[in-house]
Amino acid sequence: MRDDEDLTDLIRAAAGGDRRAFEDLVLKKRDRVVRTAYQVTGNLEDAKDVAQGVFLRLWRVLQRFDLTKRFDTWLYRITVNAAIDSLRQGGPKGTLQPLPDDAGDRLRDPASGPDEALDLRQLQGVFFRLAARLAPRQRAAFVLKEIEGLETAEIAQTLGVTESTVRNHLLQARRILREGLVKDYPGLTAGRRADDDEGERS
């Protein structure tokens, strides 16, 4: 089993119709579902609506969950698909939730060396505005990779696409963010351009 025994027992009981177990499961996962939906939609009220829909759907389909698989991956998939639907219907109305302290260490510019990372803790305000330019699946892939810390294979499972598609979404998202920095905030990128240009040629 890929999930811990306590969670597995809770899922099994909830899938069998135990409402108290399901309520406990919702309490365990609600914050993550709302946070992920918020990071994709950019709007807290939309995220709460998405979360409500996710848990209503979860109650109906939980018995289909394969207990040998990772529950969070399955829940991410339901959440992200619902959030993308919400984003497409209403358009981005807000900005991404602030990144965790270690997100800057995970977000790396593909045109630079492997040990070089954008210090997003200093550029959060800029990043929030630029992220709204990403297409829904680019934004979802970016959130799952750089904020939630999922591996490429798990993101592919979550989005129902191939790993190469995930890598392409991430490449495009990073490019859009980088180009936005260069165009709208040249003072923040002046020291990086030479390295970026060299990386693109290599």
Image: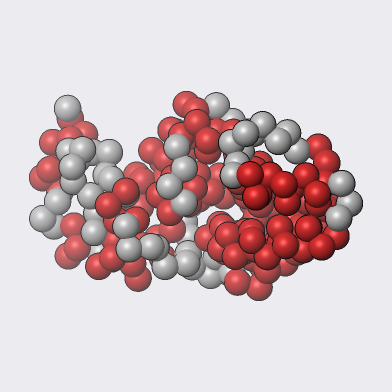
Q: Is residue 89 visible?
A: no
Q: Point out residue 113 in the picture as x, y percentages from the top left corner.
A: 17, 38
Q: Is residue 168 above or below residue 14?
A: above
- Which quadrant would the C terminus be assigned to in this image? top left
> Which residue is found at the position 47% from the left and 67% from the top?
97
- Figure check: 1 above or below 79: above
**What x and y, as percent, mark residue 188?**
19, 63
Q: How many marks?
A: 0
Give the residue furthest to the right.
17
Q: Could you say where residue 75 lies in the image, as x and y percent from the top left? A: 66, 47
At a point 70% along the width and 36% down the height, the residue shown is 67
User: Residue at position x 89%, y 51% from top?
Assistant: 17
Left or right side of 39 for 46:
right
Which of the two residues, 188 or 161, is positioned nearer the viewer here?
161
Q: How is the image coloured?
A: secondary structure
Taking depth in this image into account, of 40 and 194 the one nearest to the observer is 40
Say which quadrant the N terminus sits in: top right
- 92 shown above or below 17: below
In front of the other: 184 or 1: 1
Residue under the image location 48 percent in, 60 percent down: 132
- State the image quarter where residue 77 is shown: top right
